[in-house]
Amino acid sequence: MDQQLFDYSPITEREPLQWPGGARVAFYVGLNIEHYPVDAPSTSTFPGTAHLVPDPLNYGWRDYGPRVGFWRLLGALDRHGIRASALLNSEAAVHYPQIIEAGRERDWAWLAHGRNNAVFQQDVDPGEERAYLAEVVGTIERATGRRPRGWMGPALTESFRTPGLLAELGLDYVLDWTNDDRPYRLKVPGMLSVPYSVELNDIGLFLGKSLSGPDFVRIVEDQVDQLYEDAADGGRVMALALHPFVIGQAFRHKYLDRALEYVANHPGVWLTTSDEIADHYTRTVPSGG
């Protein structure tokens, strides 16, 4: 079947998009703050034990994120004045209160990212999806003091009903459809797609492609340089997807710091959050733009 959530729209045929202050590129960090149950397989660094319960090798590797990697990464964000767009599992909001407090102190954006990273949206019973989403959103609101505006499904998963149900719950954008360099309106009233990235993503780069730290820096630099050039005819969005158990490893830290330094000091870059990108687009771009 053909998808019915959005229309085809070549970026070359749209009205120019203007960012605040004349910036060409809106940059945000999509910081994945996730909880992984000890008795369910999930993202693994060694597939050979991924089916075991418990799986200390892979579970411990993932658990390094909230225990250590997050706090190392937090220092880099602070040094460069970058507020995260936190992609938050509702169970992580309960299990890691110190992380939530750190984000609240820094006025982060909070996005709903499912219950945990072992339950994909297609795993949820269709008749229970609205209640499931309401529970996720409500838990995050109680923990952070702010109702999430955006959604990214675990592993970027949605059912056909998810965007409409999210709109009913007061959310107004999703990150799952990574097919553009600027936001666009979905065919669900009040709902946007905001760019995210499966390519500029530490899991894909370091685990999927086994790239090095210097490779990572060069890719981030090339991305912002090209988007800046493209944006001569209208603003673009650059999302950098990070996971504390990957980029937060000690031997990768200095490369993240160098990459963020390059972006933060690049001309024409607006350091922002996905919430602010969605707000600005909704206010300034007419329907159909």
Image (cartoon, rainbow, N blue to C red):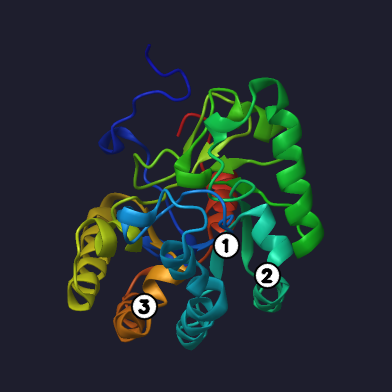
Above or below residue 41? Residue 207 is below
Q: Who comes first in sequence, dot 1 or dot 2? A: 1
Q: How many angstroms separate mark 3 from mark 1 (CA)?
A: 17 Å
Residue 96 marker: 2
Q: Would residue 145 be seen by someone viewing this image from the given angle?
A: no
Q: Would residue 108 be seen by someone viewing this image from the given angle?
A: yes
Q: Who comes first in sequence, dot 3 or dot 1? A: 1
Between 165 and 114, the one nearer to me in the picture = 114
Report which residue position mark 1 lands on: 86
Secondary structure under tag 1 reads: strand
Q: Tell me residue 97's x, y (percent).
A: 72, 72
| Image quadrant in which the C terminus is located | top left
Q: Are marks 3 and 1 in contact (CB under 8 Å)?
A: no
Q: What residue do we see at 30% from left, 38% from top? A: 11
- What's the amino acid at mark 1? Ala
- What's the amino acid at mark 3? Leu
Secondary structure under tag 2 reads: loop
Residue 260 marker: 3
Q: What residue do we see at 47% from left, 49% from top? A: 41
Between 254 and 63, the one nearer to me in the picture = 63
